[in-house]
Image (tube, rainbow, N blue to C red):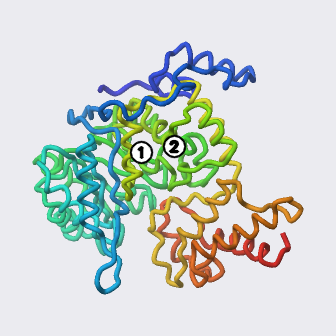
């Protein structure tokens, strides 16, 4: 794919065209939006009928940099199934990892994404065992140089991490190597991690030797760094074979509303696509927030595609843009793996009408004051024992499902109050709840979403106390 000129940057209207919809339908939708006409009136037969998902082969996309045919569904290995050993410790359930991996490959998934820091440093090892049981040419390994800590910035330490990934993954080459979480810490961090120590030059040399087949980066945080890396690509200082970004129908236009330090996925995708850089998608469900829906959104989803899960809508949206190479999903449980395979075998791209509906759904969802936590666990462990992701997960779940009492005058107040408080105690042990936060800020610097976690803890704790005291 050759780089496009500036005129091909995708506008809101052109996005529909890029997603494979007829241009005239996109134009009609755009005109009706401007005229204030309800775009739900425009219903294609595809969006009104039951899904045909799960009846064909896995959809594949070609990487223009290498010619790789990559499954549109990628297997994210940040969280793997666990079991308990004889000492009562939680460990990775290797037998289950093997089983899930076998099923994934059997059903067309060939892209597996891991990192030296996932699963407390054990993900690469577990995936190396599971994948090495299959012919090496049947799957692509993606891993990262996760040299966040200053102790890993020296050249020899970063190289040591890279070589250890090869060892743990039981391979002599990496298909997709990412510079991990570029943007965190701004330009200073970028220079410390990859430029001043010569590591970027080292990785480019490894690519020329075939030890790295595709070199890219995953982006979180400071947009200055993202733009700088694309400028390097434009100047041919380094050729990026792919890039990993956060994209979903909520972040497409509302990322900055959710968190002012984030960047709308529309901009990130457009900048990559016009340069012909394939996009790998992370957080298609935004940490699980888009796996459930409140009644208002759910009713519309089920009216259009009654057989599809709520999550399937988010996965279809993420896989629809033509510049998307693969969409990552952390599939710890077999039912999640099967549902996602069904969605992408074969992928039915979103129609213009469906895209309009999802845009309206995003507008509605963003009004709810949920916390933009993706449950990545980077904030853990908390020095004071809080289960930060679990606290946010319970709070967000209640909001998304419309089960948050907003006033003591609400006819359902007593029922909702009891359900929220009992559910909170069940989801999070009392000694690990928000009231134990002392505001040490240790967690803040580790959060890829730039959430001011102590402030959110204070708000949640204040709300819980109002419910307990009956003063809401």
Q: Are marks 1 and 2 in contact (CB under 8 Å)?
A: yes
- Residue 259: percent from left, percent from top: 60, 55
Residue hosting label 1: 339
Quadrant of the image occupied by residue 357: top right
Name the mark on residue 245.
none
- Residue 351: percent from left, percent from top: 52, 25
Q: Is residue 231 visible?
A: no
Q: Residue at x 68, y 46 (%)?
A: 295
Q: Residue at x 38, y 57 (%)?
A: 333
In the displayed structure, 242 sits above or below 155; it is above
- Badge 1 or badge 2: first in the primary sequence: 2
Q: Check the image and name the residue furthest to the bottom.
A: 87
- Measure the C-alpha gap from mark 1 to mark 2: 8 Å
Residue hosting label 2: 309
Considering depth in this image, is 338 or 133 the residue closer to the camera? 338
Q: Is residue 408 visible?
A: yes
In the displayed structure, 329 sits above or below 303; it is below
Q: Residue at x 59, y 25 (%)?
A: 353
Helix, strand or loop for disc 1: helix
- Residue 229: percent from left, percent from top: 37, 46
Q: Left of 155 or right of it: where is 378?
A: right
Quadrant of the image occupied by residue 20: top left
């Amino acid at each position: 794919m050759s780089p496009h000129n500036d005129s091909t940057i995708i506008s809101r209207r052109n996005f529909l065209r890029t997603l494979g919809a007829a241009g005239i339908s996109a134009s009609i939708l755009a005109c009706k939006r401007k005229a204030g006409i309800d775009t739900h009136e425009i219903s294609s037969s595809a969006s009104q009928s039951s899904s045909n998902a799960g009846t064909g082969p896995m959809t594949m996309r070609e990487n223009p940099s290498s010619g790789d045919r990559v499954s549109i569904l990628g297997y994210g290995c940040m969280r793997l199934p666990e079991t308990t050993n004889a000492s009562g410790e939680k460990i990775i359930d290797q037998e289950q990892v093997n089983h899930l991996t076998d099923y994934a490959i059997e059903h067309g998934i060939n892209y597996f994404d891991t990192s030296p820091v996932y699963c407390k440093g054990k993900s690469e090892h577990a995936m190396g065992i599971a994948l090495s049981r299959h012919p090496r040419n049947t799957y692509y390994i993606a891993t990262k140089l996760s040299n966040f800590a200053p102790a890993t910035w020296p050249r020899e330490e970063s190289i040591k991490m890279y070589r250890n990934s090869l060892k743990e993954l039981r391979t002599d080459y990496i298909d997709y190597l990412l510079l991990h979480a570029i943007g965190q810490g701004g330009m200073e961090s970028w220079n410390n991690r990859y430029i001043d120590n010569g590591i970027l030059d080292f990785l480019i040399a490894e690519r020329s030797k075939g030890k790295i087949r595709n070199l890219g980066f995953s982006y979180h945080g400071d947009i200055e760094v993202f733009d700088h890396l694309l400028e390097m690509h434009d100047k041919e200082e380094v050729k990026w074979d792919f890039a990993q970004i956060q994209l979903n129908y909520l972040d497409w236009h509302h990322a900055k509303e959710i968190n002012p330090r984030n960047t709308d996925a529309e901009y990130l995708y457009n900048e990559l696509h016009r340069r012909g850089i394939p996009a790998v998608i992370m957080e298609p469900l935004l940490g699980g927030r888009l796996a459930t829906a409140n009644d208002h959104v759910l009713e519309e989803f089920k009216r259009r595609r009654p057989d599809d899960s709520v999550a399937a809508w988010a996965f279809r949206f993420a896989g629809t843009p033509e510049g998307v190479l693969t969409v990552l999903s952390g599939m710890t449980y077999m039912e999640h793996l099967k549902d996602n395979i069904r969605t992408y075998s074969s992928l039915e791209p979103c129609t213009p009408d469906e895209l309009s509906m999802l845009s309206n759904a995003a507008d509605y969802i963003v009004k709810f004051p949920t916390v933009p936590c993706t449950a990545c666990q980077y904030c853990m462990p908390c020095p004071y024992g809080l289960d930060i992701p679990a606290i946010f997960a319970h709070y967000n779940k209640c909001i998304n499902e419309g089960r948050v009492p907003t006033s003591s005058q609400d006819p359902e107040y007593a029922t909702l109050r009891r359900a929220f408080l009992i559910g909170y105690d069940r989801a999070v042990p009392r000694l690990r709840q928000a009231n134990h936060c002392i505001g040490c800020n240790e967690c803040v610097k580790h959060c890829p979403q730039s959430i001011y976690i102590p402030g959110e803890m204070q708000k949640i704790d204040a709300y819980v106390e109002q419910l307990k005291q009956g003063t809401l």
